[in-house]
Amino acid sequence: MSVIAPGAGDFDRAVRDEHLEQIQRPSLSYWQDAWVRLKKNRRALISLNIIILLAFFTLAGPLLWRVDPALQDLNQVSQAPSWPKTALLVEAHAYWEGIVVDNYEPPSRYFESVEAPANFRMVETPTTQRVRLAWDPVEGADGYNIYRNNRQPANFNDLGLPLGSTYGDVISYEDRLSLEARDYWYSVVPTDGFDEYETFSQLQLKPTLALTPDEALERRLITKVNEATVGEEITLQFHPLGTDYLGRDMLARLMEGARVSLFIGIVAPFLYVLVGITYGGFAGYFGGKLDGVLMRFADFVVALPFLLFMILFKIAFGIGPGESGVIPMLIALVLLGWPSTARLVRGQVLQIREQGYIEAARLLGAKDHYLILRHILPNTMGVILVTLTFAVPAAIFTEAFLSFIGMGVAPPTPSWGSMCNEGVKTMLSHPHELIFPALFISVTVLAFNLLGDGLTEALDSRLRSKE
């Protein structure tokens, strides 16, 4: 057999080929690679942008939208989202004597039936300050009952809210009861002084939104009473998301409520995740009997009922019914929420401490604190971040649930949960009071959950080898 020895030209060609090689993929660190893969996840990236917008809404929103969340606007109670409104400036209320019948004589006998009042009319332009009504007298009637409905009555038994009654010679009525700039159906029913006749007249009208000079001054729409004249239109405060049942601006209250909800939703998870990291890392690193004792205690904490401890903490802090329990809620979340994080970190530490590079570092004289800070803790950061992103929406939902049932944040302090509790009472007539805080809770929880899913995929080093 003949052996062919390589020549010098072969080595030269090998050297030239080596220079032609180019690195097709740049070298990336673990975190750089995780960020690249996270950017490929569209849902996680959108969720991250939503969370950034929520942070801007919470921190910078009150600086841009300078409306007092506690300011009550009783002339715009439970208003739906709308464009800016104007109001008519009218004179302050003065006593109205009404309209009476000249030479009135009570009916001399009882009538089986009477005619419906004729010429049922408005005495003046109706406003949200007052609606003045009048009608012609009915033969045989010794009084009249006045009703108001928000929709057209279907029959005599559907006339709506009874406003009041007149007797004898009075054939007019002034309504000043919680008037809004909306359609009303008024009905007047003749009576014999006690019982009603089943005849009535109807009148549909829509009051004009109006303010008195004193009210405009109190709400800072004008600076002096004589600054605006009666009959002039003035622009009211703008409420882009409407108002609640006390006329408070929904947007301002959502911003203020975000501070409370996100404070609990971020601070509480950060604290109990930190406790879980320390506890689980300690148990997993040292192992043995100490690990068994520590994890059995964690199992005991998992079995404790959260609501019971929440009630006990409220009693211990002397917080009574109708008072906000933010501090007891925070303490209950921290004391009872750490075991799940401790279990995850413990499992991760048990796996990492058996790796070869840990043994090599230990043989080279590395101390425990160096191994923990340099090797073990950085390699558990992926699990910690994912756990934190899932813990935040859980804490936000817990706060919303407790505030909804009256055990968390109590009015007048706003939070998304307490606003839902207030809005559910009027959800049929004014659904925006419930929809907006519920929407913020849903979007926040969904965004953090989707971000957590994206981080789970991005931080999983096993996926790197498959790409």
Image (cartoon, rainbow, N blue to C red):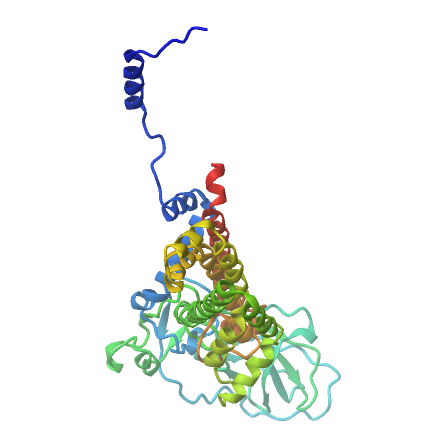
Position in image of residue 241 (x %, y %): 43, 64
Q: Is residue 331 left or right of residue 138?
A: left
Total residue callouts: 0
Q: Residue at x 43, y 42 (%)?
A: 40
Please state the horizontal and vertical placement of residue 465, each as a whole percent of the image.
47, 39
In this picture, is 428 found above or below 459?
below
Q: Position of residue 182 (x, y in %)?
A: 49, 69
* Quarter of the view holding residue 185: bottom right
Of the pair 17 and 91, the residue shown nearer to us: 17
Please, which residue is most extreme toward the front here? Answer: 1
The front one of 386 and 9 is: 9
Q: Residue furthest top?
A: 2
For the residue pair 184 and 322, the one nearer the viewer reads as 322
Name above or below for residue 100 compared with residue 34.
below
Relative vertical location of residue 88 with respect to residue 322 in this rendering, above or below = above
Residue 20 x, y percent position in the rendering: 30, 22
Does residue 97 appear left or right of residue 118 in this picture? left
- Against 355, is 399 above or below? below
Considering every residue shown, the one lying at the far right of the view is: 112
Q: Quadrant of residue 194?
A: bottom right
- Asked if residue 271 shows in the view, the reply is yes
Residue at 68%, 77% (x, y): give it: 199
Q: Residue at x 56, y 85 (%)?
A: 312
Q: Is residue 420 visible?
A: no
53 on left or right of 280: left
